[in-house]
Image (cartoon, rainbow, N blue to C red):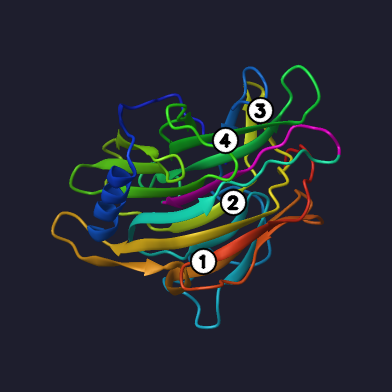
Amino acid sequence: MSHLHSSLRFARLSTFITLGVITSLLSILTQTYPAVASGSTAAHSNVGSSVPVFGNASHSSKSFASATGPVDDNNVAWAGYHTAVGQYTAATMSWRVPTARPVAEGNGSMSSIWPGIGVGSAQDPLIQAGTHADVICPGGPCTTPFYYFWWQVYPFNNEQKVPQVPVEAGDDVRVTVKYSTDKKRAQITLANVSKNTGTFIEFDLPASASAGVATQAQWIVERPQLCFPEGCSWAKLTNFGSIAITAASAFTGRANAGGSGTWKTVRNVAAFRDRSFSCDGKVLLSEPRALSAEDAFSVDWKASGDWEAC
């Protein structure tokens, strides 16, 4: 699914520049609950909807994590873990931004890392935010790494780059996305812990998003799409090596409007283990390792694949 929409609602951004503020803001959230070519737009995907998948995993068959561990869910976009249907109002995780290595064939490539909540419908929008690690071709060989923070509330806006918060390979970052039920807003915290900077974003949700709670949470390393006016193509996946995800958890239940809930780690709520393949399902592009702790796992790059439309 292409995360593009012509209706951009009002968003509020405030930048903070000290580690103390970052720590304080993340604590509050926890306790209470570039274009590769001109004219193109990076797009992110909702595997649970129309992205091609391989295998028999169902996204609505369970409302709890499997007693035997997450079920493999093979698709063209996601590598990581996501929950089955439930009630979630926030998700968070930390990672070190990987080095974007050129692929052997010399083409540009893309990769994105993010936590998210929701499934990408007008009633249950997908609130997601994270970092890109791409390789671009600025008038010459495709060897230039390009890193940036971004956020999106699909289907209500396009990917929004966040240039006021710099990021580069080796930076330790943390991102939290939240559904503020009482304020009817998506709330996003982007923190570059290494550079002692970050930003807090609020996005007004439309009346259609009336559920007040998301039905899914995700912790993902993604093969994005690149979209032009004439259509979208799945990108070659940047060689990111291995990415260690930590502090991966979700807030279950309703944290606002008199509701109740609690933070639970990825081990306690993950029902599906996402593995990314080429469109024909023959080439494994990236996959997560088994959970290494209550809230931690790594995702390994396996192959770049090709620019392709499924």
Q: Is residue 85 left or right of residue 12?
A: right
Instruction: Name the amino acid type tagged 2.
Output: Val
For mark 4, what is the residue?
43
Between the residue at mark 4 and the residue at mark 3, the CA separation in whole angstroms equals 11 Å
Mark yes or no: residue 98 visible: yes
- Return the x and y of residue 225 as percentages of the image width and height: 64, 37
Between the residue at mark 4 and the residue at mark 2, the CA separation in whole angstroms equals 14 Å
Picture quadrant of residue 206? top left
Instruction: Name the amino acid type tagged 3.
Output: Gly
Asked if marks 3 and 2 touch (Cβ < 8 Å), the reply is no
Q: How crowded is mark 3: few (under 14 residues within 10 Å), some or many (20 or more)?
A: few
Mark 1 or mark 4, which is nearer to you?
1
Q: Is residue 243 magenta?
A: no
Mark 3 or mark 1, which is nearer to you?
1
Q: Which of marks 2 and 1 is nearer the N terminus?
A: 2
Q: Residues within 10 Å of mark 1 (few under 14, many from 20)?
A: many
At 40% from the left edge and 55% from the top edge, which residue is drawn?
A: 92
Mark 4 or mark 2, which is nearer to you?
2
For the record, the magenta segment spans: 105-117
